[in-house]
Image (cartoon, rainbow, N blue to C red):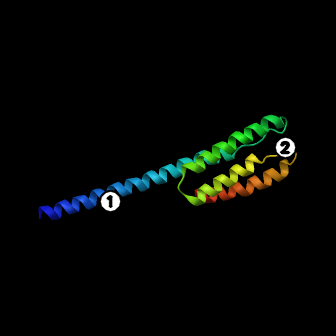
Amino acid sequence: MGVRLGALALIAVTLLVSGCAQVEQVTDRASICVDALKAAGFTPDVSDPRQSVEEARQTAEELNNLAGETPDQALKQALTDMAGTIEDFDPQDVPGYLARKGQQLDALRKACG
């Protein structure tokens, strides 16, 4: 009976630990998504193109860093795609940039959902 109780306790601990790991993974994913959606809200200041290009580069770097933190492949892809779109910001093509960014934002929201 003692062996059986020990085995049951071991199983219970194993389930508890794996459950905690899953909760931690969900929490990490949610945190990454919150940070990513904040960063994806980047809007260039068309009155200062040089500053906008630098801010776009920094935002893209932040999104790429977040992509490196997630094991979720769909989320990683959405983050790197959004980073690429923001990094490619061209002050001469704001309408095109906004259209591409809108598509990437939808994909990011879907990956986070």
Amino acid type of the residue that numbered disc 2 sits on in the rendered structure: Pro
- What residue is rendered at 57% in x and 49% in y? 68
Left or right of 12? Residue 108 is: right
Q: CA distance from mark 2 to mark 1?
A: 53 Å
Q: Is residue 88 left or right of residue 110?
A: right
Camera-side residue of 48 and 64:
64
Amino acid type of the residue that numbered disc 1 sits on in the rendered structure:
Leu
Horizontal and vertical percent for residue 97?
A: 80, 51
- Residue at numbered disc 2: 91
- Label 2: state its secondary structure: loop
Report which residue position mark 1 lands on: 15
Q: Position of residue 79 (x, y in %)?
A: 64, 52
> Does label 2 or label 1 sit earlier along the sequence?
1
Assess disc 1: are there few (<14), some (14-19) or many (≥20) residues with their C-alpha within 10 Å of its C-alpha.
Answer: few
Instruction: Assign the C terminus to one quadrant of the image.
Output: bottom right
Q: Secondary structure at mark 1?
A: helix
Please identify the residue farthest to the left as the structure is shown: 1
Residue at the image position 17 percent from the left and 61 percent from the top: 5
**Which quarter of the rendering shows the N terminus?**
bottom left
Q: Residue at 43% across / 56% down in the picture? A: 22
Residue 10 in which image quadrant: bottom left
Residue occupying the far front of the picture: 68
Q: Residue at x 83, y 37 (%)?
A: 49
Near-viewer residue (70 or 98): 70
